[in-house]
Amino acid sequence: MTSEGEGTLGEALDGGMVNAGAVFRRGSLVERPAPPTARALHAHLRALKEHGFDAAPTPVQLTQDGRERLTYIPGDVALPPFPRWVMTETALRSVGSLLRRLHDVSVTISVDTLAAWPQDLADPEGGTMLCHNDVCPENVVFHDGRATALIDFDLAAPGRPLWDVAMTARYWVPMLDPESAAALHPAGLDVPRRLRLLADSYGLSPQQRAELPRVIEQATASCRAFVADRVADGDPVYTQVLSERGGWQRWDRVQEWLVAHREVFMATLTD
């Protein structure tokens, strides 16, 4: 997130949708609304650090008024419309490598099965590893054009590693038809090439590469359902974003485009 100014709660950090205007930096700490799974999530974040993954915030405290304090991670975070520097091939490779580092550690940490992990963007097939589920540009910290940390684990839930890769591909390739991509991303991005770069930098196996296009389609359907649920609940932020970005016609177009190009993506990934 980027700084917006000083207030009584500290320096306001810009970015995000759900917690917009509610995240503040106080020196070396960030204070923000705590997710319902905060206790289990904090235990997981501490375990990540104990197992050698130092590229995520460290929990410090839960407050009595329902907020959490975590260590602040300095660096650059891109907000939409995304600047070209965050969509370079170097940036993309670094995101894939960072996600693999996270997964290599996460797979060794037992998931708290008693926690009510959010199902909003969770893998419908479940899994034994805690996925981030929201590795979008707004949740990746950069230094000198390379991804160095992940933030905002609020939507983390058990799933398959490949599900997290698919969700990440949606945002970073991006897996969008050209008209939809033009709204937020720089022009001229080579989608098949970038999908292959993400797969290579993460280190997908041949089987995972063959499965990835369909899992991306599955992840896109889950994201659509996520938006639909919030619009149905009258959420003004998601209702406005849906309207500004082409309504349900955009989602239809994206899903049709993914299916139409499935074989192209498969060939690029497995060649």
Image: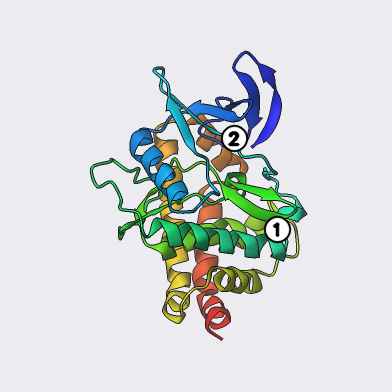
Query: Looking at this view, is 100 or 125 the one in front?
Result: 100
What residue do we see at 59% from left, 49% from top?
Answer: 149
Vertical relation: 192 (above or below) 6:
below
Q: Which mark is residue 215?
A: none
Which residue matches tag 2?
A: 72
Position of 225 with respect to 144 (left or right) is left
Colour theme? rainbow
Quadrant into which the N terminus falls: top right
Picture quadrant where residue 109 is located:
bottom left
Q: Position of residue 125 (x, y in %)?
A: 30, 60
Q: In which quarter of the image is the C terminus?
A: bottom right
Q: Which residue position holds label 1?
A: 87
Question: Vertical placement of 216 versus 142: above or below?
Answer: below
Q: Residue furthest top?
A: 8
- Secondary structure of the residue carrying tag 1 is helix
Residue drawn at (52%, 59%) of the image: 99
Label 1 packing within 10 angstroms: few (<14), some (14-19), many (20+): many
Q: What is the total number of numbered labels drawn onto the structure image? A: 2
Mark 2 nearby-residue class (10 Å; few <14, some 14–19, many ≥20) = some
Q: What amino acid is labelled 1 in the image?
A: Met
The mark closer to the camera, 1 or 2, is 2
- The type of residue carrying mark 2 is Tyr
SS of the residue under disc 2: loop
Which comes sooner in the sequence, label 1 or label 2?
2
- Measuring from the top left, give residue 231's x and y in whole percent: 45, 37
